[in-house]
Amino acid sequence: MAEVADYLEISVRTVCNIEDHYAAGGLDRALHDDPRPGAPVQFDARVKSHVVATVCSEPPEGFDRWTLELIRERVIEREVVERISTETIRLILQEHDLKPWRQRSWCVPRLDPEFIARMEDLLALYARPTDPRRPLVCLDEKPIQLLEEVRPSSGLLPGCGQRVDYEYKRNGTCNVFCAVEPQRGRYFTEVTARRTAADFSRFLATLAEQYPASEKIVLVLDNLNTHRRESLLASLGEEGGSQLWERFEVHYTPKHGSWLNQAEIAINIYARQCLGRSRIPDPETLRKRTQAWTAIVNRKQVTIKWHFTTKEARQKFDYG
């Protein structure tokens, strides 16, 4: 309870009360208090504007963000009010839909013509029907930290979860290439020591071998510096590199738009299902686990359903 209270910036007593209310009357009882006597203290627009301005400014040095207590201290220090509670500040922030403790991922820093063009290009690809002559494949990599147990973990017991010692030994890092044909649920993975241009070239060659009868492999990549034709030329020579690169029709995600690569979804599935919270001590163990996971998801043909369309993008980002 102390962790919950600290995270939400409320007292432990409040957490206990919410738990008791939930046990007594369910979710509705936990979310809504009974009417209380007396009118709440009202603060005018001047005080509210100071609270809003404070939370929209840089937090004090040493803090990543404003907390309710920091805001309370600041408005009192500046003599905006003589006293104010953190709950009142929370209500003011709620009134103005301000949540300083939240951060949004998948943010688009700048919606310029290049970003829009690349985004709509990918969304058009994802809307195409499956074509075995031009299969759609998305590719990405994931660095993995290798960690070895210092002491063996305990087994799982009734009423008691597995216990893992907090100490561990670092054994370096390695890399996992992951490609997915999302419309058909085909997954391709490879564990490598690094993710150099040569590693990328070898994985592309392996990928090309999986589609011998295809005219082109439509390939989605992010903007990593190794994801270029030059990597193949440097690793395989001018002739071999050019021939392999010509097997692919390459489409790049926008800069700061790697979330448009469906391979990220595949990697998230892999990380959650295959890696989990386990400590993997060496590349060979990781390779065996990765191969086993890949075989299972391919047997099940786990497809990815992409729902974000060009129409929704134009509405979301308010352009076009």
Image (cartoon, rainbow, N blue to C red):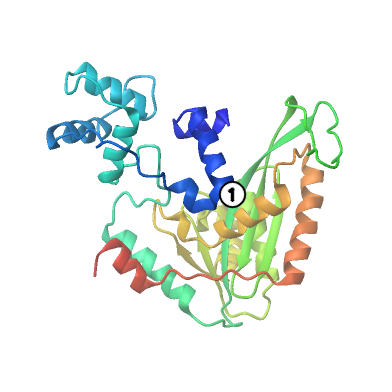
The residue lying at 81 percent from left, 44 percent from top is 285
Number of marks present in the image shown? 1
* Disc 1 element: helix
Residue lying at 73% horizontally and 26% vertically, measured from the top left: 166
Q: Residue 214 at what x, y percent from top left?
A: 62, 79
Relative to 107, does residue 313 appear above or below in the rendering? below
Q: Answer with left or right where residue 66 lies relative to residue 225.
A: left
Crowd around label 1: few <14 · some 14–19 · many ≥20 (10 Å): many
Classify residue 286 as left or right of residue 221.
right
Q: Quadrant of the N terminus?
A: top right
Relative image position of residue 162 (x, y in whole percent): 80, 38
Task: Compare residues 223 and 48 and report the one nearer the observer.
Answer: 48
Instruction: Locate residue 215 relative to residue 29 in the image: left or right.
Output: right
Disc 1 residue type?
Ala
Quarter-wise, where is residue 60 in the image?
Answer: top left
Q: Is residue 224 visible?
A: no
